[in-house]
Image (cartoon, grey):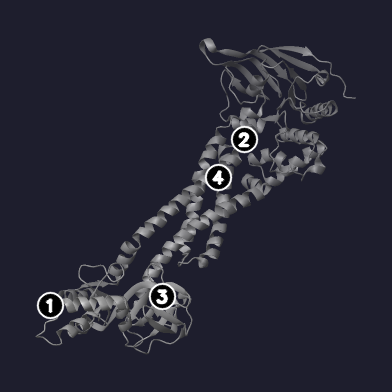
């Protein structure tokens, strides 16, 4: 049997191709939105994977350290190390900030890691250039997405750091690349005040009679020293010994240390289900709108094409063409338009994805779902045109 | 009953009902033998198109009988269940404008009817080529309709009407858009084809230049036909 749809498309291929390209750009935008969402989820999972932790120990009643502020004493890790099942425990701090490098600044997640060497929870698990941090101060390892190079000098608060190593795919759940610095520097950066504020703080403390008693020498100095140091970290990352169940160890830590402990699944739920939930809904709304617009375009184009063939359809019906043949003609054209759009959309999303500032992850499964969705949308969009075509009276082909 | 061709007896068609009812056809009698070309002539609003639509099984008459070939197809009600198949397999249509399918080439425009009926593409195209050769447009077989002249398009349209070897062809003002020379050429072709394929052809027209070519003419006025012997003027 002859393919009427195929012949019509070949006859007016320019119209179909250009319409398909326009539709494809919309589909490409939809794929990209899906890719942005997948990228955010992937970034969150990668951040958890790269931390090397099995458990995250944070301040009670918080969702820290990524979704909410969390503050615990930096010596807590010692007592956690004593709990059965804990192989390694390390302090970590996270601070999202603008880091200056020369004339530019980059938004990064500054991560403070303990100077226990590679393999310690929180450290970047691999490098693509340079070396890991070996000194206790003023060295940094940066994700390549920051644009920093080995030997670059970074300004974090008042201190300057030298980039000694570069890593890859180390980003926060919001897509900001990470910069790793020694923990002590990071603690200082989190709480460091400017000189004027320090002077004012010291003066206020000195004027407080309870803290500056004439009969207690050294009290004021002790208080000031205490005020200008930071004994807090955001979390303790814990690695378990082989054979231990994370729930059991987490229960022990939270019971004896009065801290909140999250395992990998719980932390993933916090990141994906809470931290990026609003962004996900936002992206979802955009995808729904783009899908509706795509469907409306397909429906409009197919309806217009069909209305342009009313006389031919009347002739086809008069000479005995079955309704299903005419419906197939219209539906096949809608599907063909959708397939052109899908191919163009997939190619454009793949081509422009790497240029997006955030990680765009185009999953093969999403492409398959997208293909099915495009076909279904095209079929549904062609219904209006099919109804119009089937209403055409074959008598219209006969004059009078 | 005639062996082939078409015969109608007392065919009536009423539109609407009650006080607003209009009797478009008031009892038409008509008979066209195989190989014969007759004219159906009448002013606008006389019922020509309604009669053509009834004959073409596009609308249902109100009463009467229609015998197509050797089959009673209407007797105060349709006697066939699949009117679409009846139109596809047993009636040929030639329209005022050719109405060729713009995205099919000449061969497939003609062969389409047979393909829709489930015939193999090769057989359908072979039959189409035979007719296109007979109508002297075989050399344009691969052309698209937009590449043909008006006369060539109308000949392709006639080939399409003949391709299913119907007992009857209904031609609705087939010469309207043509000049005298081409109009007469089309009528000559219809006569040749009627004889060659033993087909009854009813030509609806009010084209003064071709009316003298018919040997028999049915005048229709106010829903009633009057038969008249035509001049049957030679095309030469």
Q: CA distance from mark 1 to mark 3?
A: 40 Å
- In the displayed structure image, the side of residue B234 where residue A294 appears, left or right: left
Nearer the camera: disc 4 or disc 3: 3
Which residue is denoted by mark 2 in the rendering?
Answer: A310
* Disc 2 chain ID: A
Which numbered mark, 2 or 1, is in the foreground of this view?
1
The verdict on a common chain for dots 2 and 4 is yes
Q: Residue furthest bottom?
A: A135
Q: Looking at this rendering, what residue extends furthest in the left direction? A: A215
Q: Name the residue beneath numbered marker 3.
A: A99
Query: In what element is the residue under mark 2?
Result: helix
Element class at badge 4? helix
For the residues marked 4 and 1, what is the alpha-carbon distance in whole angstroms? 87 Å
- Which chain is disc 4 placed on? A
Distance in Å between CA atoms under marks 2 and 1: 96 Å
Same chain shared by disc 2 and disc 1: yes
Q: Which residue is mark 4?
A: A331
Q: Crowding at label 1, few (<14), some or many (≥20) Cα neighbours within 10 Å? A: few
Mark 2 is surrounded, within 10 Å at the Cα level, by few (under 14), some (14 to 19) or many (20 or more) other residues, namely: some
Residue B187's x, y, as percent?
Answer: 81, 26
Residue position marked by numbered label 1 in the rendering: A209
Considering depth in this image, is B162 or B71 the residue closer to the camera?
A: B162
């Amino acid at each position: 049997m002859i393919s009427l749809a195929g012949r019509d498309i070949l006859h007016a291929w320019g119209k179909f191709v250009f319409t398909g390209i326009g539709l494809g750009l919309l589909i490409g935008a939809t794929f990209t939105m899906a890719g942005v969402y997948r990228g955010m989820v992937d970034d969150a999972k990668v951040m958890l994977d790269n931390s090397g932790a099995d458990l995250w120990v944070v301040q009670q009643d918080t969702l820290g350290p990524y979704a909410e502020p969390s503050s615990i004493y930096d010596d807590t890790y010692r007592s956690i190390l004593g709990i059965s099942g804990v192989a390694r425990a390390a302090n970590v701090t996270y601070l999202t900030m603008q880091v200056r490098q020369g004339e530019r600044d980059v938004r990064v997640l500054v991560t403070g890691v303990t100077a226990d060497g590679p393999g310690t929870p929180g450290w970047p698990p691999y490098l693509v250039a340079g070396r890991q941090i070996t000194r206790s101060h003023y060295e940094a390892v940066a994700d390549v997405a920051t644009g920093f190079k080995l030997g670059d000098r970074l300004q974090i608060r008042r201190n300057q750091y030298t980039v000694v190593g570069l890593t890859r795919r180390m980003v926060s759940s919001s897509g900001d690349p990470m910069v790793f610095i020694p923990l002590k520097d990071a603690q200082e950066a989190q709480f460091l005040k400017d000189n004027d504020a320090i002077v004012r703080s010291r003066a206020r403390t000195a004027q407080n009679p309870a803290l500056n008693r004439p009969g207690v020498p050294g009290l004021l100095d002790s208080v000031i020293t205490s005020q200008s140091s930071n004994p807090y970290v955001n979390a303790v990352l814990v690695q378990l010994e082989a054979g231990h169940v994370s729930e059991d160890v987490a229960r022990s830590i939270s019971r004896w240390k009065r801290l909140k402990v999250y395992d990998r699944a719980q932390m993933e739920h916090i990141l994906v289900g809470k931290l990026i939930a609003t962004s996900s809904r936002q992206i979802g709304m955009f995808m729904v709108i783009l899908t509706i617009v795509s469907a409306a375009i397909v429906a409009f184009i197919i309806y217009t094409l069909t209305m342009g063939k009313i006389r031919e359809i009347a002739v086809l019906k008069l000479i005995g063409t079955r309704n299903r043949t005419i419906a197939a003609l219209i539906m096949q054209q809608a599907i063909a338009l959708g397939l052109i759009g899908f191919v163009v959309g997939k190619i454009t999303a793949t081509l422009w994805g790497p240029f997006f500032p955030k990680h765009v992850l185009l999953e093969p499964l999403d492409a398959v779902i997208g293909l099915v969705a495009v076909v279904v949308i095209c079929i549904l969009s062609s219904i209006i045109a099919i109804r119009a075509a089937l209403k055409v009276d074959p008598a219209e082909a006969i004059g009078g | 009953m005639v062996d082939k061709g078409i015969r109608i007896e007392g065919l009536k068609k009423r539109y609407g009902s009650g006080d607003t009812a209009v009797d478009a056809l008031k009892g038409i009698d008509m008979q066209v033998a195989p190989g014969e070309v007759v004219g159906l002539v009448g002013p606008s609003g006389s019922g020509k198109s309604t009669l053509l639509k009834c004959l073409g099984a596009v609308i249902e008459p109100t009463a009467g009988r229609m015998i197509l070939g050797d089959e009673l197809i209407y007797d105060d009600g349709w006697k066939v269940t699949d009117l679409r198949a009846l139109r596809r397999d047993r009636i040929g249509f030639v329209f005022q404008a050719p109405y060729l399918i713009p995205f099919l080439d000449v061969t497939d425009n003609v062969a389409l009817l047979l393909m829709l009926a489930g015939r193999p593409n090769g057989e359908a195209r072979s039959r189409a080529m035979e007719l296109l050769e007979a109508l002297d447009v075989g050399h344009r077989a691969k052309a698209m309709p937009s590449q043909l002249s008006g006369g060539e398009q109308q000949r392709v349209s006639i080939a399409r009407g003949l391709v299913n070897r119907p007992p009857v062809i209904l031609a609705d003002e087939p010469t309207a858009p043509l000049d005298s020379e081409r109009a007469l050429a089309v009528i000559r072709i219809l006569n040749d084809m009627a004889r060659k394929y033993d087909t009854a052809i009813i030509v609806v027209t009010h084209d003064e230049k071709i009316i003298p070519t018919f040997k028999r003419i049915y005048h229709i006025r106010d829903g009633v036909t009057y038969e008249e012997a035509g001049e049957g003027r030679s095309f030469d």
